[in-house]
Amino acid sequence: MDHFTKITPEEYQKSPFQTIGKEWLLITAKKDGKVNTMTASWGGLGILWGRPVAYIFIRPQRYTKEFVDASSHFSLSVLGEEHRKALNYFGTVSGRDEDKIAKSGLKLCYQEDVPCFQDANTVFLCRKLYAQPLKPECFTDAADDAKWYPEKDYHTMYIAEIEGIYMK
Ligand SMILES: Cc1cc2nc3c(=O)[nH]c(=O)nc-3n(C[C@H](O)[C@H](O)[C@H](O)COP(=O)(O)O)c2cc1C
């Protein structure tokens, strides 16, 4: 990882509503020496169990889920507007069908053996703490269950400790 500086969570001043909701994240993990990545625009940053954490939500059919499940760590990379085409590509094509990272032209790099993107402006290095599939009986507003899960493909929620935030 070249040209990144590690900052503390308190030094991170950007709005998670903007970063996650508008700029989007690339969730990246390694399994058996292979790396896959996907776009995500749902998630959160906050504090839990006395630690800075990230929350992400992955549907069961995503190839990336296999990589996140197999690994103790994953990264969240934030890319600038100039990479919108790649973000759309990573969010519509599956790594089961194409070697997405090779085709994208983006440059993979590693922080403590966790894959992430040199092209990012921000990388969150995350260590998994908790994973649980959302359950229909747990919705307190049934409208969201009906709206988002007609196929019953409930996201798994991952809570991960943010071990490092790296910014350019
Ligand atoms: C803007 C955007 C946001 C997305 N957010 C999520 C998300 O938060 N969780 C999820 O499971 N899929 C999300 N997706 C869908 C995956 O990125 C998409 O299905 C991707 O092709 C999965 O790739 P994979 O099979 O290689 O893992 C999003 C897609 C886009 C375009």
Image (tube, rainbow, N blue to C red):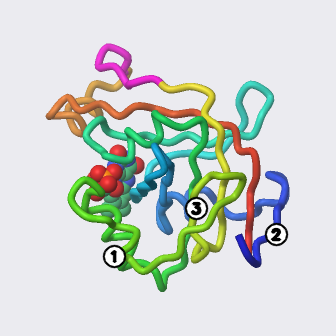
The residue to which callout 1 is attached is 103
In the orientation shown, which residue stands out farthest toward the bottom?
A: 82
Amino acid residing under circle 3:
Cys
Q: Residue at x 34, y 67 (%)?
A: 100
- Sequence order check: which comes first, mark 3 or mark 1? 1
152 left or right of 110 in image: left
**Image: magenta residue range:** 132-139
Q: Is residue 79 magenta?
A: no
Question: What is the distance, in whole Å, between disc 3 and disc 1 at their CAs?
Answer: 16 Å
List x then y, in percent, for residue 29. Answer: 50, 49
Q: Quick one: 42 or 133, which is closer to the camera? A: 133
Give ligand 1's quarter of the image. bottom left
List x then y, in percent, for residue 45. Answer: 64, 46
- Sequence order check: which comes first, mark 2 or mark 1? 2
In the orientation shown, which residue stands out farthest toward the top?
A: 137
For the residue carrying disc 2, how many other residues have a C-alpha within 10 Å: few (<14), some (14-19), or many (20+)?
Answer: few
